[in-house]
Amino acid sequence: MAEGRATGGSTPTIGRRSFIGVGAASLVSAGVGFAVLLIAPRVLPNEVDVTDFLAFWSFLFLWFGILGGLSAESTRAVHDSDRRTEAAHERREPRMLAVGLGVGIALGVVLSVSSLWWAPQVLGPDYAWLALPLSASIALFSGHAVIVGVLGGRLQWATFARLVIGDSLLRLALIVGAALVAATVAGLAVAASVASVTWLIGLAFSPTLRRAAAARSDVPLVPFLRRIGHACLASGSSAVLVVGFPVILRLTSSEAAYEAAAGLLIAVTFTRAPLLIPLNAYQGVAIAHFLNNRHLGFRALLPIARLIGVVAVVGAVLGGLLGPLLLGWYYGPGYVVDGWVVAGLVVAAAAMAMLTVTGALCLALVRHRAFSAGGLAAWALAVVVLLLPLDTGVRSVLALLLGPLLGLGIHALALRRSRVVEKPPVVEGEQS
């Protein structure tokens, strides 16, 4: 069956087999995140080491989240670029992988050079040197982000799923190896960093990946960089609230309060993973869906919004009732948090999921300024709330809920003003 064949008023974006494949990729990604949370507290000697490793892990994936803007913009750009009629030798637009690697390497160099300033505060004084493997991993991951985005824009979901699964499994294998050989914060951190080479390994074996690496943008370099900037700002602002929360909590809390928050940080991650890790894997599908159905405008996101709402209600009830018991059973009494905190974190995760979806629609409709404005507003309000003199659990729930709601309002306002565009032609993707 060819993916992307039009039927009825809307254009299908992904076939059943490929949907299952991307779902499997999202489950593997989520499973790796859960596995790390299960492994680290077991192999590290104390709660302080656990919070130190969680700070590194969240900071690494915060930057991966920022570079998610490369994926999002690459998906949009290749969707339109592949519809250009010029011959290949006449094209002058930049190759997206070269631009993405340039962005990633520049970020890596800036982070490495400035690490004397930020690393002692973010990673802790004993682990400031981990800024070096972290910077290298970020530079490498930019290539993964671009290629994943191109595969999504071309509806090549089978290869997309294999690359996501490969990256996740390599990271898990390296972390398990480090846990067995060098069960330290540094050992786990270096292992988590090295897995960013997965896409380079894939290039040697996959013609589809090599074709994705050669894809060109739909616009010249300067406007392409401008759009990447908006996409990375939005993705980065969201990533601060999705995976970078331990970092901003550490920077807005006393050292004693942060070290006592191991249970809260575990709860934040567990409540966000069921919605946001699969959504991250399906974000390319969502963007491609919105691109193929731009003629539907705001209505294109209604089925996704209903699903997120159902998951939020069920998850909040179950999390509030069972969350404290499960945390206490597995991790011990030092990791228990109140049931209302777990339920509130589930609702906050749903708000973040909706912000991610509306952001994808803004990008598909080329509303890049609204896309970035919503993410930045969510991040800014969350930081302000975290600075309030409240209990750590209270301000964490409020920050993670109110910030995304503000961003969601900005996106909704922009989307309601967007004009509905004509239905685009259908381009078939990878055969499955």
Image (spheres, rainbow, N blue to C red):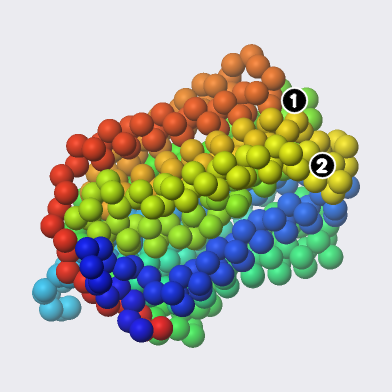
Vertical arrangement, residue 104 with respect to residue 28, above or below: above
Q: Which mark sits nearer the N-terminus, 1 or 2?
A: 1
Which residue shows up at 56% across the image and 69% down it? 24
Q: Residues within 10 Å of mark 2 (few under 14, many from 20)?
A: some
Assign the N terminus to one quadrant of the image: bottom left
Q: SS for tag 2?
A: helix
Residue farthest toward the top in the current orientation of the protein = 389
Which residue shows up at 73% across the image and 59% down it? 35
Vertical arrangement, residue 104 with respect to residue 338, above or below: below
The residues tagged by marks 1 and 2 sit, at their Cα atoms, a distance apart of: 23 Å
Q: Nearer the viewer, residue 185 or 263?
A: 263
Which residue shows up at 38% across the image and 52% down it? 303
Q: Nearer the viewer, mark 1 or mark 2?
A: 2
Vertical arrangement, residue 360 with respect to residue 86, above or below: above
Q: Is residue 39 visible?
A: yes
Which residue, given by chain and number where applicable, does mark 1 sit on?
Answer: 257
The image quarter containing residue 407 is top left
Assign the C terminus to one quadrant of the image: bottom left
Vertical arrangement, residue 213 with respect to residue 338, above or below: below
Q: Amino acid at mark 2?
A: Leu
> In the rendered view, does 142 fall on the left or right side of 415?
right
Which residue shows up at 49% across the image and 85% down it? 205
Q: SS for tag 1?
A: helix
Percent of width and height locating residue 270: 67, 47
Which residue, given by chain and number where applicable, does mark 2 sit on?
Answer: 325
Percent of width and height locating residue 87: 13, 78
The image quarter containing residue 263 is top right
Q: Amino acid at mark 1?
A: Ala
